[in-house]
Amino acid sequence: MNDLSFTVPLWVWASVSLVIAVMLAVDLIAHRDNHVIGFREAAVWSGVWIAIGLAFGLVLFAWQGGEVSSTYYAGYLIEKALSIDNVFVFALVFSFFAVPDAYQHKVLFWGVIGALVFRLVFIFVGAELLQVFFWTAYLFGAFLIWTGYKMAVSKDEEVHPDRNIVVRLVKRMIPTDPTFHGGRFFTRINGRRVATLLFVALVAIEATDLIFAVDSVAAVLAITTNTFLVWTANAFAVLGLRSLYFCLAGLLRRFAYLHYGLAVLLAFAGVKLILSETPVGKLPIPLTLGVIVVTITVSICWSLIATHGDRDDHGATPGTGDAHGADGGGVTGPGSAPSAPSHGTEPPRP
């Protein structure tokens, strides 16, 4: 197993966490007015987040050398690729709940914070299991291979945010008003504090991200069990999710075959994880990086070439359809959102 053991002082963890917190604060201040984010603004922010993620790899290179830096880049690339699949689900959730464009960034901002917390927990638990019980590598590897298979064959399965068990529990436990009240998650009606439909959409985003977190974290753990590298690769990739969504929201239908590439990456990560506990041992990081880059490039180019000439991808950002009630009633109209890949498993249903 590629654990790349090296000492990470507490001040380094604190410094990286501070950088992440500062970036989140800057992003929140820049979008405090709940304005509609256009493609140009999203592209600029995406460039900023990607540049920061790549720059951190250079910091690691100067600090710990090429192997550590290459391992980080491998984890960052596979997490970034898998995050594109998150964008499909974001579009579906926003369209289902008809979240106004001006409030989508706010939902994603708090959704990303939740995603960072959940991933940090999964990383430490998963890494500890792999280090203590060698046979968990076979379980995680088999899970990743199965998830890759499900992603390849189940792209057209519909995901219903209102059926997610977490969303249903929240509606039962917290009084909910089936409408939006500006950009507020909670409001008062007749003196009673209630959750708004925007909060329900946030819960749906968080609940579906839990599914993504399991296999995406497992995929990076297949590359290394070094918690610092896995955490930073996940964090810097996830930080750019909001901008990535606004960049790609109108182009999602052009990525018709991307799910096959993501399926290959998940299956490859599973095989790599299993081989790490066999006489074959860990696969070289340069090979891992090569497989990731080639797979992503081929699947994206294949998608763009196959959908060349399509005109359905120039519409407005998903999430501007007819509003639904908080009970999930109603159905989005044709073309209001792309079909979201199942990412291996559907959100839990009661």
Image: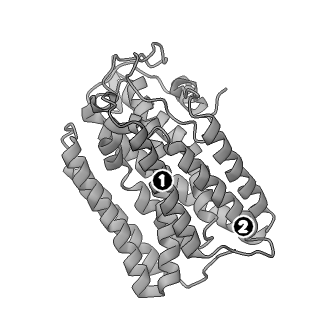
The residue carrying mark 2 is: 130
Going by the numbered disc 2, the residue's amino acid type is Leu
Q: Is residue 145 above or below residue 157?
A: below
Q: Residue at x 30, y 42 (%)?
A: 246
State the residue position of label 1.
Answer: 298
Return the x and y of residue 196 as percentages of the image width and height.
38, 26
Report, in whole angstroms, how far the alpha carbon at label 1 lies from the one at label 2. 32 Å
Q: Is residue 135 left or right of residue 320?
A: right
Residue sitting at x 33%, y 27%: 312
Q: Considering the numbered disc 1 on the image, is that residue within a helix, a strand or a loop? A: helix
Q: Quadrant of residue 37?
A: top left
> Does residue 299 appear in this view?
yes
Residue 221 on image: x %, y %: 62, 64
Q: Considering the image in quadrants, where does the C terminus appear? A: top right
Left or right, 117 with respect to 242, comes to right
Up/down of 71 relative to 254, above or below: below
Q: Nearer the viewer, residue 182 or 339?
A: 339
Q: Amino acid at mark 1?
A: Val
Q: Quadrant of the N terminus?
A: bottom right
